[in-house]
Amino acid sequence: MVEKFREWSMNIAILTSGGDAPGMNRVIETLSKRANIAFLEGVKGLYEIIELPTFISFHAFDIEVQDKIINNLKDIDYLVVIGGNGSLEFTNLLIKRGVKALFIPATIDNDIPNMESIGFDSALNSAIEAIDKISDSALSHNRIFLVEVMGNKSSAIAKALSLATGYRCINDDIEIEHIENSSEILIIPESLKALNRYSKVLSSKMSKEVKIISLGHIQRGGAPTARDRILAAKYANKALENISTNSLGIVKI
Ligand code: F6P
């Protein structure tokens, strides 16, 4: 199989765009063992190959930008895009314009419908580790903690974290109104954009101090879990198979 791909001497470009996610590198590693690769730094990198000095503003969905990107890709046989929702939209747009492109989901937000995204499991495990630590203090001091977890428009981490730890995930303003004076950890999805507001609501009706923690980017970093490494390898291998059969679009494993 490896030799077959080497014989092809294909120019495969890999594009990682949007937020980084643990496990993305495993995809690149797997693909790079089997084909000629052009590494590009995000969608902007696709554009800047020839236009860096005159670069002022950049909108990946502008027609002139697309034209240049497509021109830059003329010697590329296949483009493999690794990323989230925006990257999927961009992949579909390129395919419509005749570019041979594949898409592999990698976002800690895990919000590509019907697919498991690379990075989600690692981010979830980082969040679980953090909650375990916070719970030691929450229980020993009888305090209430609001812990915000990432997810731009997605509550995937928050919901899975709630199941994994047994702590409540807050879904809306009504739920926060009903919290009684207690010592517990409440998981707040970032997508609600309500951490400070909820803190004020709770502080005004409770005798105890309310602690707020936003886990932030620690969820995006660190070593990928075994599950994410395996997932990444599976997506990469399937992408190679899709290239061999000339398939386009989402890589399904
Ligand atoms: O899409 C991944 C993500 O980590 C979201 O969960 C979060 O809202 C966003 O990216 C943060 O983006 P940035 O690193 O640009 O602040």
Image (tube, rainbow, N blue to C red):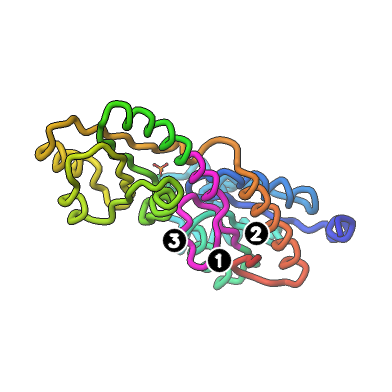
Q: Mark 1 is on which residue type?
A: Leu
Dot 1 surroundings within 10 Å: few (below 14), some, or many (20 or more)?
A: many
| Towards the viewer: 91 or 194 | 194
Tell me, yes or no, whether the two marked residues, 1 and 2, touch with CB atoms within 8 Å.
Answer: yes
- Image point 45% across, 64% down: which residue? 63
Name the amino acid type tagged 3: Phe
Q: Which amino acid does the dot numbered 2 rest on?
A: Leu
Q: Where the N terminus falls, by quadrant?
A: bottom right
CA distance for labels 3 and 1:
10 Å
Q: Position of residue 229 (x, y in %)?
A: 66, 47
Q: Quadrant of the C terminus?
A: bottom right
Magenta residues span 103-126
Q: Nearer the viewer, residue 28 or 165?
A: 165
Mark 1 CB near ligand 1 (8 Å cut): no
Quick one: label 2, few (<14), some, or many (20+) residues within 10 Å? many
Magenta highlight on residue 121: yes
Kindly report which numbered mark, 3 or 2, lies closer to the viewer in this rendering. Answer: 2
Q: Which mark is residue 94?
A: 1
Disc 3 crowd rating (10 Å Cα; few below 14, some 14-19, many 20+) is few
Residue hosting label 3: 61
- Can residue 57 be seen by looking at this rendering? no
Instruction: In the rendered view, tell whether residue 110 sits above or below residue 99.
Output: above
Residue bearing mark 2: 79
- Judge left or right: residue 118 versus residue 180: right
Question: Could you tell me how far apart the alpha carbons at marks 1 and 2 are, in whole angstroms?
Answer: 10 Å
In the image, is residue 179 above or below residue 144?
A: below
Please state which of residues 248 and 141 is positioned toward the viewer in this rendering: 141
